Amino acid sequence: MRRSPSRTYNASFTPPASMQPNRIACPFSRFPTAPPAPIARASARPIRQAIVATRHLLEMYRRGLPDQKTRSRLQRLDHRLLAISDQLDRITAEK
């Protein structure tokens, strides 16, 4: 049985750019966000805040897109999120 030679690796070795994984720029990487704080009890407020934040990021991303068809799709998604927020307001107002 043939044994492979033992190899030792240098921890400070940096591979050339051709060996490094490709990194695609993500538009959201420019906007660091903190993880949400733990919620003591469930309520509509954190859901509403998440919807508002999502709509904001979606709008910023949508404005940077050159393709009108994709922009229209994202705008329709924004309108659906707004409808969800309105429904949440109606549900919490009934209580």
Image (cartoon, rainbow, N blue to C red):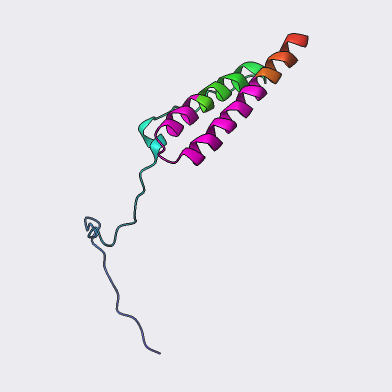
Residue 68 to residue 17: above or below: above
Residue 66 to residue 36: above or below: below
Stretch in magenta: 56-85
Which image quadrant is residue 25 in?
A: top left
Which image quadrant is residue 18 in?
A: bottom left
Residue 10 to residue 39: above or below: below
On the picture, is 62 further left or further right than 6? right
On the picture, is 62 further left or further right than 76? left
Q: Nearer the viewer, residue 79 or 29?
A: 79
Q: Main secondary structure of the magenta part?
A: helix
x and y, in percent, of residue 90 in the image: 73, 14
Q: Nearer the viewer, residue 89 or 42?
A: 89
x and y, in percent, of residue 68 in the image: 47, 38
Q: Is residue 79 visible?
A: yes
Q: Is 80 covered by the magenta stretch?
A: yes
On the picture, is 88 further left or further right than 6? right
x and y, in percent, of residue 34 in the image: 44, 27
Q: Residue furthest bottom?
A: 1
On the picture, is 65 further left or further right than 6? right
Q: Is residue 43 visible?
A: no
Quadrant of the snapshot with the N terminus: bottom left
At x 22% / y 58%, what residue is drawn? 13
At x 44% / y 33%, what residue is drawn? 61
Q: Tag count in the figure?
A: 0
At x 39% / y 34%, what residue is drawn? 64
Q: Is 8 covered by the magenta stretch?
A: no
x and y, in percent, of residue 56 in the image: 48, 24
At x 30% / y 57%, what residue is drawn? 20
Quadrant of the snapshot with the C terminus: top right
